[in-house]
Image (cartoon, rainbow, N blue to C red):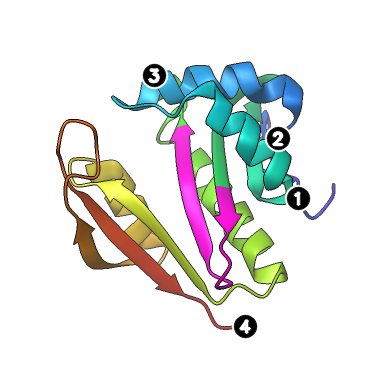
Amino acid sequence: MSEDEVQVSQECVVRRARRSDLRDIYLIEVKSFPYPYPMEAFITFLVLYPKYFFVAECGNRVVGYVTGVREEDGSGHVMSLAVLPSHRRRGLGSALLRVLEEAFLRDGVKRIYLEVSQSNKEGIKLYRKFGYKMVGVKQKYYPDGSDAYVMVKEVHT
């Protein structure tokens, strides 16, 4: 197993995303968020930031993903993380976030941040568990005018 592939359970593994995963990734996005990213966004993330794009695969089926970018200031930005509703609460979100954070750390990232909907209680709980702290609010971040929390994790190697 490579450093970018992690066995999560007997049937599930986290690995780098491939072009052939994009349809499944998009379907997970649509099932997970009221304002999904368009397919073009995922194509862009995969082309520009392939080393920060991972999927959770269970029984040869993509059931979750995480994608991030490294910003010009050297910080890591978690762009999106989602797991199919039928596969949640099995540690897949944690495994995906851990693998992305490790990829950021290998590239010298010292600060990771993300935006999360104020109504996404499970997401907030996950990020807090990983040491992310709320540092602000982006007002009217979503198309319906709702706000997002900005959460940050300072990492030290």
Disc assigned to residue 31: 3
Circle 1: element type: loop
Q: CA distance from mark 1 to mark 2?
A: 10 Å
- Within 10 angstroms of label 3, few (less than 14), some, or many (20 or more) residues? few
Measuring from the top left, give residue 132's x and y in whole percent.
36, 66
Of the numbered discs 3 and 2, the one sitting upstream in the chain is 2
Which quarter of the rendering shows the C terminus?
A: bottom right
In the displayed structure, 18 sits above or below 119; it is above
Q: Amino acid at mark 2?
A: Ala
The quarter holding residue 136 reads: bottom left
The residue where tag 1 is placed is: 4
Judge whether residue 64 can be spotted in this image.
no
From which residue to which does the magenta span run?
68-82
Measuring from the top left, give residue 1's x and y in whole percent.
85, 47
Q: Residue at x 17, y 45 (%)?
A: 140
The residue where tag 4 is placed is: 157
